[in-house]
């Protein structure tokens, strides 16, 4: 019986695991699935993988639901499904542990923009690989919601909306200031903060509209947009999801 475990792993840990698999002996297969591949197509491909029948449905579901695609590395020396931090480039199915396309993806010095927005605070950064090359953090005062009701509440809400609008426009200016010099180089954009606030900000910031096709990943859970949290965020951006199958025992951490 196959037992499954899931975890997030850093870029360095995953690269080490790929090195171990590359030198492993015994039969294995590798399957690279780009984002947008249908679940039916994935199930058919997984169906050709020896001894993967018990995990085929789960494999196909996880891969089809990933915005970045997936990589299946399945053999006697280990059974792994990797959801990488950035999109798989092309479909590939081959014998052996073919780790080179995934390793190449993880070792590229991608240019990543990180934009974190909460009401009253923001952080903007541009990273080359995991090195921060440009950043800006700041705050802006926005009144809390008024609960008393009546005309006073309506006036307060109008004032609050004006404060939010001014804040979004100011943050958008800082985003353009920091991202503008790198706009031709930026590979991906990742947002963080509170979902409704980020959605409202993106609608208000015209500069970001031309970069919508580079947005990846769910929102980063950053509660306080500060310089330290911005610098720490890039580690999460580069983490991969790793699913491990082992026979009859809980998989050990990688």
Image: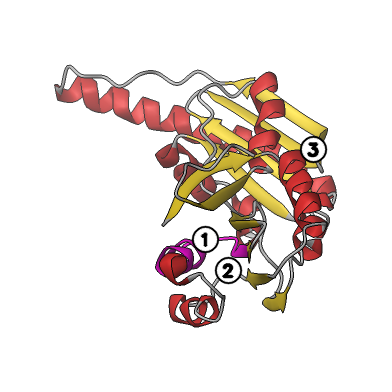
- Residue for point 56% across, 76% down: 49
Which span is picked out in magenta? Answer: 57-73
Depth check: 37 or 180 in front? Answer: 37
Magenta span contains residue 77: no
- Rendering coords of residue 40 (x, y %): 44, 80
Residue 126 lies left or right of residue 79; in this view the side is right
Q: Which residue is mark 2?
A: 35
Q: Is residue 230 above or below residue 128?
A: above
Q: Quadrant of the N terminus?
A: bottom left
Q: Which residue is mark 1?
A: 66
Depth check: 77 or 11 in front? Answer: 77
Residue 224 lies left or right of residue 113; in this view the side is left
Number of other residues with Cα within 10 Å of mark 1, as a class: few under 14, some 14 to 19, many 20 or more: some
- Rendering coords of residue 190 (x, y %): 62, 45
Q: Which residue is mark 3?
A: 130
Q: Earlier in the sequence, mark 1 or mark 2?
A: 2
Q: Is residue 91 above or below residue 123?
A: below
Residue 209, picture quadrant = bottom right
Q: Secondary structure at mark 3?
A: loop
Q: CA distance from mark 2 to mark 3?
A: 24 Å
Magenta span contains residue 68: yes
Q: Disc 1 vs disc 2: Cβ atoms closer than 8 Å?
A: yes
Q: CA distance from mark 3 to mark 1?
A: 23 Å
**In this rendering, which labeled residue sits more in front, label 3 or label 1?**
1
Q: Is residue 16 above or below residue 30?
A: above
Q: Quadrant of the C terminus?
A: top right
- Rendering coords of residue 114 (x, y %): 67, 40
Q: Earlier in the sequence, mark 2 or mark 3?
A: 2
- Residue for point 63% across, 37% down: 236
Number of other residues with Cα within 10 Å of mark 2, as a class: few under 14, some 14 to 19, many 20 or more: many
């Amino acid at each position: 019986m196959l037992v499954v475990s899931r975890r997030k792993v850093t870029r360095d840990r995953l690269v080490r695991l790929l090195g171990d698999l590359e030198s492993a002996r015994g039969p294995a297969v590798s399957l690279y699935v780009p984002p947008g591949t249908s679940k039916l197509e994935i199930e058919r491909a997984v169906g050709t993988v020896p001894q993967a029948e018990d995990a085929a449905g789960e494999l196909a579901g996880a891969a089809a639901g990933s915005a970045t695609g997936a990589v299946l590395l399945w053999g006697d020396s280990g059974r792994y499904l990797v959801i990488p931090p950035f999109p798989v480039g092309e479909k590939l199915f081959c014998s052996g542990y073919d780790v080179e396309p995934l390793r190449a993806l993880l070792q590229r010095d991608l240019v990543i923009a990180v934009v974190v927005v909460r009401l009253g605070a923001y952080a903007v950064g541009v990273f080359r690989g995991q090195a921060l090359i440009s950043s800006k953090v700041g705050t802006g005062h926005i009144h809390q919601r008024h609960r008393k009701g009546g005309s006073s509440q309506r006036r307060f809400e109008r004032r609050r909306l004006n404060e939010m609008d001014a804040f979004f426009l100011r943050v958008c200016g800082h985003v353009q200031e920091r991202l503008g010099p790198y706009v031709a180089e930026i590979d991906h954009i990742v947002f963080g903060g509170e979902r409704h606030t980020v959605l409202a900000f993106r609608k208000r910031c015209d500069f970001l509209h031309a970069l919508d096709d580079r947005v990846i990943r769910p929102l980063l859970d950053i509660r306080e947009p500060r310089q330290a949290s911005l610098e720490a965020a890039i580690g999460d951006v580069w983490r991969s999801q790793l699913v491990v199958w082992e026979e009859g025992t809980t998989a050990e951490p990688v």
